[in-house]
Image (tube, rainbow, N blue to C red):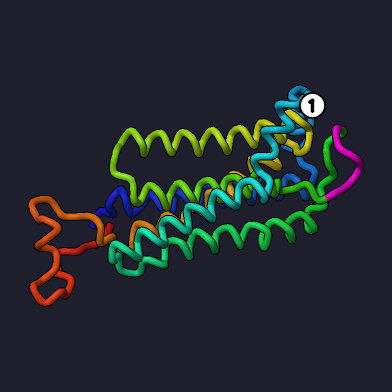
Amino acid sequence: MPVPARSRVLPALVGLPALLFALITWQVLADGPLVGLDERLSRALVHPDRLSELLSDLGNVQVAVPVLVVALAYVAWHGRVTGVDLWWLPPLAGALSMVLVPALVAPLKEWTDRPGTPAVPPATGYYPSGHTATAVVAYGAATLLLLWRLRAPAVRRGLVVLCALLVLGTSYGLVRRGYHWPLDVVASWCLGVVLLAGVRLVVRRTPDGSRTPPGISRSTRRSSSGTPSSSNGPS
């Protein structure tokens, strides 16, 4: 029996980035040819300026995490007041994805012990980029959680574009300023996508009581006794 295309999406979202992350990590540890290419690319791209400094700050915990916290609070409140089953599960998944960022990045930095670019003081522990991972997961999880609630296609597209701009802006700023090698940033993209795949799975499988199936009014979604009707399905 053929596997539905949608069922193949999540394994691809996890498997391909995880494979790429493993390849990059191996190259960093082995000082492979990708590292030499990475260093040459960095020398061509680094040009510290005020704009790159400001863009890199988008990955600061003090900037990105409050955005996610606001989204978590709104989704939790909205799900609770609209009577969504397991309303607490998507916010919990979003929060857990953010907690996992330092839990994964810190040991990886210590293990790989990669030195920084010539644009920063001599030090090690630059791989992967914690700022990039923070931006990907904070802005990405906030977007996934809010898309679950938004109905207008234009607003949904605008939110996705805004998320992409924030992540790409952070990444560009970090590389342009010289805070990170390009591979540090790409590896964090991969790590962030894997973490967001878990959030996406939870969001898609959480019943959304605010959605009304076609042809059924909101008033008929509950029986006369106030018990939720059987028409409610997964989002």
Kindly identify which residue carries mark 1. Answer: 48
Q: Determine the image quadrant of residue 119.
A: top right
Split into 4 quadrants, where in the image is the N terminus? bottom left
* Between 20 and 230, the one nearer to me in the picture: 230
Q: How far across and how far down the image is residue 215, in percent?
A: 8, 51
What residue is rendered at 28% in x and 54% in y?
3
**Residue 6 relative to residue 75: left or right:** left
Residue 15 appears at what percent x and percent y?
A: 50, 52
Residue segment shown in magenta = 119-124
The residue drawn where x is 31% and y is 50% is 6
**In percent of the image, x 25 and y 62: which residue is there?**
209
Quadrant location, the C terminus: bottom left
Instruction: Spot the residue most to the bottom.
Output: 225
Q: Please tell me whether residue 177 is drawn above or below residue 234 in the rendered image.
A: above
Decide which of 139, 2 is in the foreground and name it. 139
Task: Identify the residue at horizontal 9%, vertical 62% (top origin).
Answer: 220
Q: Tell me residue 177's x, y (percent).
A: 76, 31
Q: Main secondary structure of the magenta part?
A: loop
Q: Tell me: 185 left or right of 78.
A: right
The percent position of residue 43, horizontal first and vertical second, equals 80, 26
Q: Nearest the camera: 21 or 48?
A: 48
Q: Amino acid at mark 1?
A: Pro
- Does 121 appear in magenta? yes
* Number of dots carrying numbers: 1
Q: With 168 as the anchor, is 155 left or right in this view?
A: left
Q: Left or right of 164: which side holds 75?
A: left
Please tell me whether mark 1 sits on a helix, a strand or a loop: loop
How packed mark 1 is, by other alpha carbons closer than 10 Å (few <14, some 14-19, many 20 or more), is some
